[in-house]
Amino acid sequence: MEEQGIDRRRFLKTAGAAGAVALGAATNPGRTLAAATKRPDGPNVLVLMIDSLRHDHVGCYGLKEVLTPNIDALAKESVRFTRAFPEAMPTVPARRSLMLGRRVYPWRNWKAEKGLPPTPGWNGLTDKDTTWLSALREHGYWTGYVTDNPFVGFTPNFAGFRRTLDHFLPISGQLGVRRPAKTISGATLDHWLPQQMRGIKRYHDGMRQYLANTGAGTDESQTCAARVYTHAIEMLAEAKKHGPFALVVDCFDPHEPWDPPRKYLDLYGDPGYRGAEPGDVLYKHADYLTPTELARLPAVYAASVTMTDAWLGRFLDAVYASGLADDTIVVLLSDHGILLGEYGWTGKPALELHPELIQVPFLLRAPGKGGGGTATGYFASPHDVGPTVLSMTGTPVPATMNGHDLSPLTAGRQPKRGRPFWYGGYANHVYVRSSRWAMIGGGDNRGRSLYDLRADPGERTNVAVKHYDVMADLYEKVLADSHGTSLPYFV
């Protein structure tokens, strides 16, 4: 049974009116939380979230053909987590997990919110929620956030969260009208939109506006990555005046749609190719793409990854040039990956929770570069970021946070709490992983698949029928850890 992905176009149409007045505008509401009477002496905090970045498309994680020199350089100064899996996916659940510093899956008490897709786990953040950013602000830190994320940046569901920051800057492009869609010709639209998607109005209109907003592959400076990191450089200068600071730079690229300039495409495909490019995908079986479109899809995605890395590099150059690097904690991670034809699928189908979709890059750089260049197989997740940076800044960790403090790894020690297995959720589906096994199934404990990672590290052979006892044991471990008698399943 095919499970539909998040309908981004339908959301953008709904959210457009709410976000229109704020597009590209800075917000600086003033301190709504109690300000500390004395600035702390702790290090700065910089968290770099990159949406839809596959771990295996980052050079330091193995796929050397994809060029990510700036992330790779950061990895040489960081602890690199080789088993990082978000406990909650996709975009919005992952950011709730990141900001709250605690598990949000299983979402047993989930209720749909007006303004967000009615998909399990999708809820916003209010000014009543305790985040690690609000904890640092209470501790005397200046806090900032730059993003083009259409949900965090523009929906009313995150308005309360935005008010808890000293400076929140939403960047238009993924959402809004920077230039009229009519400036994009039909030929240009057809160049970037797969044939089977052209007749679907929400994709036709959405891609046309996206191309108008982002340069249509011809003006790199107008891409969302370029504009997010350029504005982040400006906010870095502001943050430096107020230090210590905690700054989040949350870039939606390389999330689809894609329109990378030719110079990046030619790194991964035939430089002589001048045919159409698959600049978007459906969350379904890949047979809707033509053979040429499917063959070009990895090149388009890789080009978008390299372009994002290039603009991230400009921002990181500014960090080092500012003299802040030696006194700044840096965390880089993603919320999930994306399927590019693997297992016969494209996009982010919730029933295909394999590493291409669920494993992410995760780097932790300590101010003294402790542990720099090392790798660890400790299971890590976005909700560990809060407890980790709070510990490293000497800030009390709120009782609501149950993520693990990963900072001992920067000193060559193990975290106080071990993780012999890990699990997470996406919509109605759950994954469970150990050193030996990977299980995927429904929250109702049906439709399960099991992979023996020793014999089948690529997860291509389902051995569920041979190991019912293993699946039962993994499921019971999840129930015990999540303190429940069942996992949620919404119909």
Image: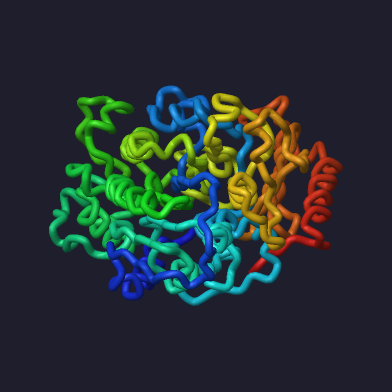
Quadrant into which the N terminus falls: bottom right
In depth, the one of 210 and 18 nearer the eye is 18
In depth, the one of 227 and 47 nearer the eye is 47
Q: Taking 36 as reference, is 407 above or below it? A: above
Going 51% across and 67% down the picture, which residue do you hit? 35
Going 23% across and 57% down the picture, which residue do you hit? 208
Do we see residue 86 in this rendering? no
Percent across and percent down for residue 393 are 59, 48
Quadrant into which the C terminus falls: bottom right
What sort of colour scheme is used for the picture?
rainbow
Q: Taking 34 as reference, is 260 above or below it? A: above
* In-image side of 337 versus 223 (left or right): right
Percent across and percent down for residue 429 are 65, 55
Going 50% across and 29% down the picture, which residue do you hit? 75
Q: Residue lying at the far front in this picture: please name it.
A: 38
Percent across and percent down for residue 452 are 73, 32
Report the number of discs.
0
Q: For residue 310, what is the image quadrant?
A: top left
Do we see residue 341 in this rendering? yes
